[in-house]
Image (cartoon, rainbow, N blue to C red):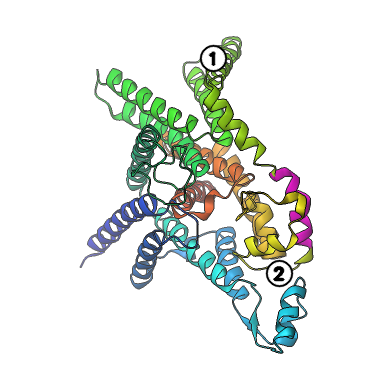
Amino acid sequence: MTSLQRQMGQSDFVAVSGVVLIISAILFGGATRVDVLAPLIPRLVAIGILAALIWRGQLGIASWSRAEQVIWALLFAVPLIQLIPLPYTVWSQLPGREYARSITAALDMQPWLQISLTGNGTVNALLALLPGFAAYALARQATERQMRTWLFLLFWAGLASAVLGLAQLASGTESGLRFYAITNADSAVGFFSNANHHASFLACCMLLAGYWLIERLSDARSGAEPATFAFFITAVAIMAAAVLFTFSRAGLAFVALIVLAAAIFAARRLNLPRRKLIRGSIVVLLVMAAALYAFLSDPLVADRMAVDIRGNGRLDLVPTFARIAFDYLPFGSGLGSFDPVFRAYETPSELDFNYLNHAHNDYAQLLIEAGLPAALGIAIFLLWWARGALTVVFRAQGSERTRVQAWVAVGVSAIFIAHSLVDYPLRGAAISVVFAISCAIIARTIAMRTNSRFE
């Protein structure tokens, strides 16, 4: 086999693996609960892909930057270390083990125990990393054409999920179109179990719709533009409608920002004067405000949103989260342990009919579950991402297509980074794969900029 044939074989493997991973993640990775079996499928697909990449000598970690290697090493090291059994005399001295010590003392037992208070939850957290890691490893070595195919596939998946979500809503709370038994039965959830996660996914797909439009227009034959624009507007309208009917406040905010950014981008492309650009932005904001007012004026919608607000006093829990995190420093309570740990701290005033299986602030939850290593990892990642975003916006190299792809990747990753402040979208395989691909695009842009300095 010649070198060219070998390279073509490797490229074909990357292309096909990416498609298979994305499809399996979207169709079966829309839930985050430990007791749901569907997420096992994208994890098994990821294991197969990673095993094949290692066997073929194609994993490519050696070519990544030091920051990328450190971030991924921390992600895998934390759960692995938390699963190491310790002698009881050492384990019992760890902070936050008072309640567990009382149980072992009552049983007159001193077994070797893991750092994590919930070993099964930590194993689940470890396995949950695999789809994202496989997606990142593939995306770091994908060609521009392969990446474009994957992003187009995600756009079509978003459109399909939006249509499915609207069909679910139209067919009622007992709709057989819903993929998961435990779900938001009164919202458009599409391929997901959580309406908020569906909303942020659709917001990202609206950005991908813009990318699809730009790519199609650059390839389109003369006279094909009207049909392309018509389909784009229809697709975005369907996705925006599906976001509205997720009843997600974060989703509504993301859509509003995307529409405003798209209007500004279009105006800049048309070289409009700054005065007209400002006036146009104001008009777009007024139109969005009027549309949102009309949407919320419906009594059923207003009641639905009001119930969501009353049942969601999560900001009031921040002091409790901070106290739990401090009590379990420096190593945390163990990934996947938030639910039982929080129950031990929950006060009578915080009791609610709605159980809190996650903190709905992934940064706070990671500090509780992984302590100082989580704080270090979050800081390193956010600094790396900020550097990448600035590089993309101000100093990106390559063709216009490459730059637009990188801009979209920054927007997609920014949505999930922001949404993690009020939810936990990245814990599911579907969104973690999308996020990993967008981060890999940013990493490629940084590498391209760094390498160009030495050309």
As helix, strand or loop, the secondary structure at mark 1 comes to helix
Quarter location, residue 29: bottom left
Task: Tell which of 96 and 6 is nearer to you.
Answer: 96
Q: Position of residue 146 (x, y in %)?
A: 33, 47
Say which quarter of the image contains residue 218: top left
Crowdedness near tag 2: few (<14), some (14–19) or many (≥20) residues, C-alpha within 10 Å: many
Residue assigned mark 2: 331
Residue 215, percent from left and from top: 35, 32
Q: Vertically, is 397 above or below 294?
A: below
**Is residue 376 among the parts visible in the rendering?**
no
Q: Secondary structure at mark 2?
A: loop
Q: Is residue 77 above or below residue 143?
A: below
Numbered label tally:
2
In the image, is 248 to the left or to the right of 49? Answer: right
Residues 393 and 296: in front is 296
Q: CA distance from mark 1 to mark 2?
A: 50 Å
Quadrant location of the N terminus in the rendered image: bottom left
- Pick whichever, 162 or 247, lies toward us: 247
**Span colored in magenta:** 314-326
